[in-house]
Image (cartoon, helix red, strand yellow):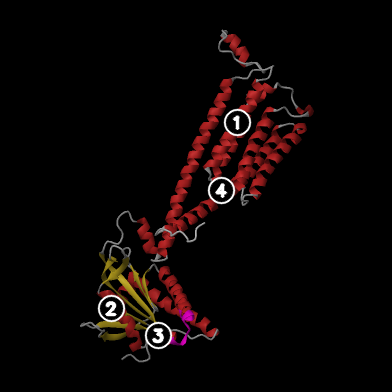
Amino acid sequence: MMLWPKRQPRGSQSRNSLGIRLNRAITDEEQRGLIFAFRARVIAVIAVMLWLVLLIEPQRQLYYLSVSSVLLLLGVIPHLLRYHRHAVLIRLAFVLLDAVLITAVIILTPPGDIDYGFPIQMRVRGPEFLYLMLLIVGAALSYSPLQVIWTGFCVVMAWGIGVMLVQMRDDTLQYDPAAEASPEATLRLVTDPYFVGYFNLMNQLVLAIIATAILAAAVWRSRRMLLRQTRAEIARADLARYVSPDVADAIMASDQAFGVPTTREVAVLFADIVGFTALSERLPPDRVVRLLKSFHERGSRVVFRHGGTLDKYMGDGFLATFGAISDTPDAAARALRCAIELQHEIDRWNAKRAERGAETIRLSTGVHCGPVVVGNIGSDRRLEFSVIGDAVNIASRLEALTRRLGCRIAVSADCLAVARRHSADLPEFISAGAVQLDGREQSVAVCVWPPPPKVQ
């Protein structure tokens, strides 16, 4: 008995979580495979039943249709019990019943007067063995190599035992390799209705074993591929919780080291809640957290919808970039359309907040474009994919400028001109003239939206 819990090694919890999710994904895929296999079985049995109706005489139809119905029932029971805690054992047991039933129906003569009276030896020499091969093929739909191997084993054992029992009958003729016989005598022997040869049996069993091995290997390979794809999807989902989806996709798809610093023309968008400090003083902490969470979710959806990269959250604001991952000629137009939709999204959110008596919020946005350095920054232990450059500083200053200009969006005139070359349907922006931004020697021509009551 352990008085103290065993300390988990560092990283073991995350590995256990990954293993649990992988197992859950594989289990779900196996369940979908079993459902698909059951549906395929139903279709196959119904097709056989229809074929039997067309093929055999009416007096023999009842027997074979009854056998087909039993075979259908043997598939329904494990399908209904597929979520049972012993579902695997139940499924394997019914596979054995399938093999035994089909073997018995093929070899044993039909009851009553519906038998043609042919020797039983002839029943193991026809193509009916292929019905057993269908069991092996159907098992491949289960995504379980174990079930394929077990099905092949059951088929080989059931058919092998059945044929050997027929060979052991007193009236069965067999080929004696020690006896010398003319070709004519051998031909008469192998064409005799009471003859059963080992060569035919060995061919059937060897082919069944080979088919089982090939299908089991194919299912195992498909399962491995599913594991790799599932692991990649889980890794991408985990990664997307910390970086934007386009960054996650680029990291997963990159054959080389991701994030090597490079210079690109990028549009930068800063968004910030105006007066958030005063608002947070009036709200309890849990409501502040809920407000920020809702704001970040709404903002990130809009950014991603316009093909942007969410660079980072900064308390009550965020930094988004357009064209940071790959060259995007219309990055400026995307950023401005995103900025306008963000304001519309805030308006819709404010309408809902007003209905329940909550305070409305105001969002200020600054947009600029220009050359920046894009890539990983930080130390070897902690990297962050971000953008650095004067364009980032200008966008930040433009966002702060909205308070002085009384507008919701402030964009540099150069960025607006670039955006209009790629999108002529942008709304009207009013020029605010050349503005001296904090910390900069050169002034920047600024345009604002919506038009302020009075532009200083």
Which residue is under mark 4?
33
Which amino acid type corresponds to the residue marked 1 in the rendered image? Met
Q: Residue at x 46, y 50 (%)?
A: 227
Query: Could you tell which of marks 3 and 1 lies nearer the N-terminus?
Result: 1
Q: Which residue is mark 1?
A: 157
Does residue 166 appear in this view? yes
Circle 2 is placed at which residue position? 394
| Marked residue nearer the N-terminal end (1 or 2) | 1
Point out the frontmost of discs 3 and 2. 3
Q: Position of residue 49 (x, y in %)?
A: 69, 38
**CA separation in Å, label 1 and label 2:** 79 Å
Nearer to us in this view, 173 or 45 = 173
How far apart marks 3 and 2 lie (CA) works out to 23 Å
**Front-lying residue, 183 or 26:** 26
Q: Which one is earlier in the sequence, the residue at label 4 or at label 1?
A: 4
Label 2 residue SS = helix
Q: Residues within 10 Å of mark 2 (few under 14, many from 20)?
A: many
Q: Dot 3 lies on which element?
A: helix
Kindly indicate the quadrant of the structure image that contains residue 189: top right
